Image (tube, grey):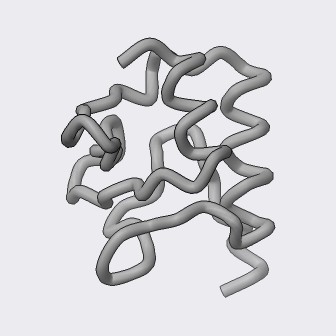
Amino acid sequence: MPPDDFMAAISDGAQVGPTDKNYKAYVVLATGEAKFYFQHLNEAQRHEFIRLLNAKTLNIGYPGRFYRLPFFIAVDPGST
């Protein structure tokens, strides 16, 4: 799945299926499920992904969170 298609799909509400890997996710589309590797996102797309995640508009499948955050997302140690 090309990065622009991935970003368009998740921006339009496509469900992202979490995995136990920090480098990939599955996207549920009308045509089926597509695998996406996060390393294909450019810096601007990574920022947009984080914005969608922080705004809680990212549609994440069961259990509603990532098992492991994508590799490019760092958690602020002071927020835990």
Q: Quadrant of the N terminus?
A: top left
* Relative height, residue 63 to residue 18 (above, below): below
Q: Residue furthest front?
A: 30
**Where residue 31 sits in the image (x, y, percent)?**
24, 35
Would you say 35 lies left or right of 66 here? Answer: left
Q: Residue at x 31, y 38 (%)?
A: 24
* Relative height, residue 49 to residue 78 (above, below): above
Q: Residue at x 73, y 67 (%)?
A: 76
Would you say 36 lies left or right of 54 here? Answer: left
**Where residue 20 sits in the image (x, y, percent)?**
21, 58
Q: Residue at x 77, y 79 (%)?
A: 78
**Where residue 22 sits in the image (x, y, percent)?**
34, 46
Q: Quadrant of residue 63?
A: bottom left
Q: Quadrant of residue 58?
A: bottom right
Would you say 51 lies left or right of 65 here? Answer: right
Q: Residue at x 32, y 43 (%)?
A: 30
Depth order, front residue of 9/62: 9
Q: Quadrant of the C terminus?
A: bottom right
* Relative height, residue 56 to residue 48 (above, below): below
Depth order, front residue of 26/79: 26
